Amino acid sequence: VQLQASGGGLVQPGGSLRLPCATSGFNLHHYPIAWFRQAPGKEREGVSCISASGGATSYVDSVKGRFTISRDFSKRTVYLQMNNLSPEDTAIYYCATDFQSTCGSIWYRWAYWGQGTLVTVSS
């Protein structure tokens, strides 16, 4: 099982980024993918998740209306589109999956993680 997050970088407030999470070694149809983030000095928090069956999506309140999670089965990739970014979104972003967790499971219950990609929102 492998996940690889990418797409981070420096962006100005109000800007956008799209983070891909490339996956391999498991069936993307069968397991949820979640995005987490961790800012300096803060606990890791769930940002968004897409469920296995049906593709139901969920978001933490602070990103609702600004972030969109989606998946492309042909590319085995899950995307996090982030719009109207603010400095409070600055963090390392991780994608994760687990064969028993569901969207809503706390971060430490997810077994498989990508390496993280740094998003810095600053003018």
Image: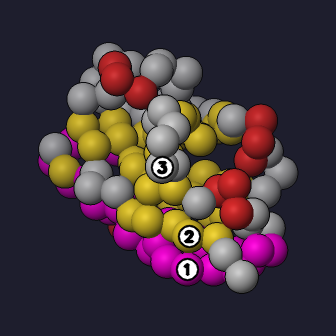
The amino acid type of the residue labelled 1 equals Leu
Circle 1 sits on which residue? 10
Q: Is residue 50 above or below residue 114?
A: above
Q: Residues within 10 Å of mark 1 (few under 14, many from 20)?
A: some
Is residue 114 visible in the rendered structure shown here? yes
**Label drawn at residue 85:** none
SS class, disc 1: strand
Check residue 13 for magenta coloring. yes
Label 3 or label 2, whichever comes before in sequence order: 3
Of the pair 109 and 25, the residue shown nearer to us: 109
Read off the magenta span: 3-28
Check residue 67 for magenta coloring. no
Query: Which quadrant of the structure image shows residue 73?
Result: bottom left
Look at 47% across and 19% down and name the residue there. 105
Look at 47% across and 72% down and name the residue there. 8
Of the pair 60 and 102, the residue shown nearer to us: 60
Residue 86 in the image: state x and y as whole percent: 75, 63
SS class, disc 3: loop
Disc 1 to disc 2: CB gap under 8 Å? yes
Which image quarter holds the N terminus? Answer: top left
